[in-house]
Image (cartoon, helix red, strand yellow):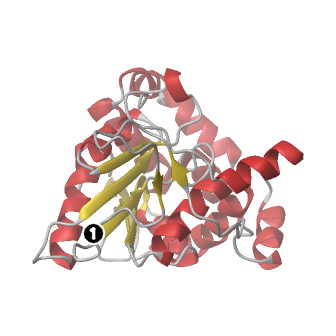
Amino acid sequence: MSVTRLHAATLAGDFKFSQITTGFIEYRDNPSGHSCETGHVTNTSVPTVAAFDLDGTLADGGSVFKWLRFLRGDRATYFAALTLAGPLLVAALRSGHWADRAKERLFRKLLLGEDADDVRARSRVFALAHFQEHGRDWVIDRLRWHLDEGHDVVIVSASPQIYVDVVTEQLTATGGLGTRLAVDARGKLTGSYLGKNCRGKEKLRRLSEWMVEHHPDAAPVLYAYGNSRGDRRLLRGATYPYDVGRLGPFGALRHFPRLKRSLVEVAITAGE
């Protein structure tokens, strides 16, 4: 997508997401014998937190490589990726720390010396346009359901904090946790992480830290939504974990319950 199209999409309006307000109904195995969960399912005396992954969960596909292309252009981005073809291939196959290191090496090649304020401003343009086009309405509707219920909603993503903040603001989520980028004394990006890549164990650690800070007196009931193996730790730590990936029984989270779409949306989709 060109910069002109991205900017035009931004000016057209932020996030044209579906406004379906019906509640969700999920069918799952339940020791009590009840066949479904509807509406209010948590004890209102205990705080409730809903954690959502970003790429592949709230939005289709990945955003990081597209973000780099937007910032640095196709030629520079593809050339940098080509020079790191080996590490990036290993990262795709093995994930884990291989993915963390390869991503940081790509950032160093493309972001070293970039002005942080300029990148922040352009990242806002990118994020608004990208998630307007690629947002997954039915998962965003689930996020809104949590907000309507008075739950805290936290976006937890390996994507850069610099635009996770933008999405958090647009969706009026309570908090956003992303991969933080280091900035030097001159206000320039170093290309390195500030801390760790926010995936796997780090997602759960950052979220746990956030919950202790915001709910020091009681451990919250935790809902978690993800789509990939980078979300497994997060879902394992949740009271109510949900897989919203497209691969379903073939995906990395196939052992977790699937989030069912609302009956109203299913009916609308069937009628299209």
Residue drawn 35% across the image and 56% down it: 223
> Which residue of the protein is positioned furthest toward the front in this rendering?
33
Residue drawn 51% across the image and 23% down it: 249
Few, some or many C-alpha atoms within 10 Å of disc 1 (few <14, some 14-19, many ≥20)?
few
Where residue 25 appears, as percent x and y from the top left, is: 54, 52
> Which residue of the protein is positioned furthest toward the left in this rendering?
217
Please name the amino acid that badge 1 sits on: Asn
Viewer-proximal residue, 152 or 100? Answer: 152
Viewer-proximal residue, 240 or 108? Answer: 240
Q: Is residue 202 left or right of residue 30?
A: left
118 above or below 207? below
Residue drawn 49% across the image and 72% down it: 168
Where residue 142 appears, as percent x and y from the top left, is: 54, 60
Label 1: which residue?
A: 43
The quadrant in which residue 144 appears is bottom right
Q: Is residue 70 left or right of residue 113?
A: right
Q: How many marks?
A: 1
242 above or below 102? below
Viewer-proximal residue, 181 or 25? Answer: 25
- Can residue 194 be seen here? The reply is no
93 above or below 25? above
- Can residue 271 be seen here? The reply is yes
Q: Is residue 165 left or right of residue 260?
A: left
Where residue 151 appears, as percent x and y from the top left, is: 38, 73
Secondary-structure class at tag 1:
loop
Where residue 172 appears, as percent x and y from the top left, is: 51, 78
61 above or below 162? above
